[in-house]
Image (spheres, rainbow, N blue to C red):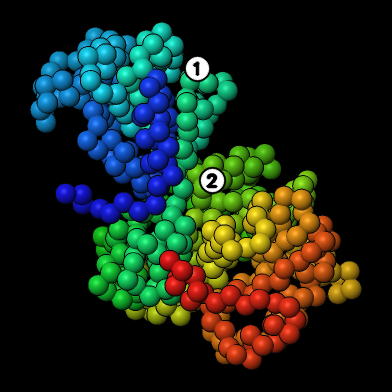
Amino acid sequence: MRKTKFIARKRELAALNALYESGKFEMPVIYGRRRIGKSTLIDYFSENKATIFFQAVESSANNNLMFLSQRIDEFKHNRSFSHTSSYSDFRHAFLEVNAIAERSKEKLIFVIDEYPYLAEAEKSINSILQEIIDHVFKLNKNIMLILCGSSMSFMEKQVLGSKSPLYGRRTAQFKILPFTFFETAEFLKGLSGEDIMAYHGITGGVPQYLEFVDVTSNLQDNIRKLFLEMGSPLLEEPENLLKQELRNPATYNSILLAISHGKSKYNEIASVIDVSSGAANTYLNNLISLGIVEKKTSIFDKKGRKPIYKIKDGLYRFWFRFIEGNVDRISRNRVEGLHAKIMEDLPGFLGYTFEEVVADWIWENEALDFEPRKVASWWGSDPKEKREVEIDIVAPDDRDYVALVGECKWKNPSKLEKGMIDDLVKYSRLITEVQERKLYFFLKESTTWFNEYAKGNDVEVIEFSSFHKEH
């Protein structure tokens, strides 16, 4: 019996099965940040199929060869534990995998999980594997090699990159992303929409983090259990991930802290961490490659002249806003004030999450009368008011003829004002790159008078409750 439910990844699963049935050698590459569900996807895909699953470890080449030899021996003799001696080298181990596939009545799936660990231990493994693929595996229609890894920069450069010996060998690639809000809602089915929004916001939609949520407890208790107790599963998670993925984690910590405190421009960030401009760019690019930070430009700014940086990962956003700097008090169980502050400030924290959820809604909403090519923010100057203005959501079509233009407010109805509609109407006219603008206002909850005022200004109001009902 499966211990966890399989949510989303249906397109990836279908694509993997199509490769499996192709009648020829296949080599899909699967990668994504830690805890994202890569191994779960492979487990579900390979269930009831002939599979040799080898997970590389942070150890020597000899140890990895020994573990690979054991996995091969276990498959050959259908036993759970093996004490076989190692093959003489990785090439001979791979040749044995090929021999097994040739004898098999069905296609053999050969998985190398955490491939970056193997490459770190055995520097020549890319070249060894290249030779095996080109001269052995490709001649065998009965084998499917899956390379999987959590180090996204390594997988993109050393496996998929043009300078890698493995370049051009992959037959498919899958970058596994966090759950969308709607996938999180499916995972946490039965909870209220607002609770699902909160859990999605503080976990970033990462499946393993969502598994820590106790659906029998309330939101307040879950936040305490997840972050505010000794041994809480997410208390040290962001710091641990930085240490695992990056050198100089203290510098990256400073960058994320600066961004979380509103330092969104490049020069602001560089000045805070006191490094050269080029070094700051390298640090930021590394965080971007991990999916922790995003570089945003106004949607029609093709030259990217005024980029800003935001923390993209929900867990990191939450952690650097509420937990960083408070670990000592958590260790001493002095958390009542902090817990109260988190619950009080949580609606404000979820404002940016709501913008991301609206983007998910736009991408999944087939009822729109045009197909968006991109969903992003817009900002620019208002010449009359002589100030910078920003619009949360702009989604143009392929021709930049029509665009959905919208604002997102995760506010209680008592805080709604007519001026919000007036500003949307006024500032939408500054977007001159499109001819037609469809105006939307996305709200946590609306009122009759707000809906009527919006309708009178040709603005469609979409309440969050309709998101949850649809899924």
Near-viewer residue (286 or 187): 187
- Foreground mark, 1 or 2? 1
Report the residue at 71% width, 57% height from top: 396
Above or below 110: residue 230: below
Task: Please provide percent x and percent y for residue 423.
Answer: 75, 78
Mark carried by residue 165: 1
Location of residue 389 (image quadrant): bottom right
Report the residue at 24% width, 32% height from top: 49
Q: Element at badge 2? A: helix
Looking at numbered disc 2 in the image, what kind of residue is underneath it? Leu
Above or below 398: residue 458: below
Residue at image mark 2: 287
Camera sees residue 345: yes
Above or below 270: residue 113: above
Report the residue at 29% width, 23% height from top: 107
Near-viewer residue (250 or 234): 234
Q: CA distance from mark 1 to mark 2?
A: 26 Å
Task: Please provide percent x and percent y for residue 186.
Answer: 37, 62
Location of residue 394 (image quadrant): bottom right
In the drawing, does residue 391 fall left or right of residue 199?
right
Looking at numbered disc 1 in the image, what kind of residue is underneath it? Pro
Q: Element at badge 1? A: loop
The answer to whether mark 1 and mark 2 are in CB contact below 8 A is no
Task: Please provide percent x and percent y for residue 77.
Answer: 11, 21
Task: Please provide percent x and percent y for residue 350.
Answer: 51, 70
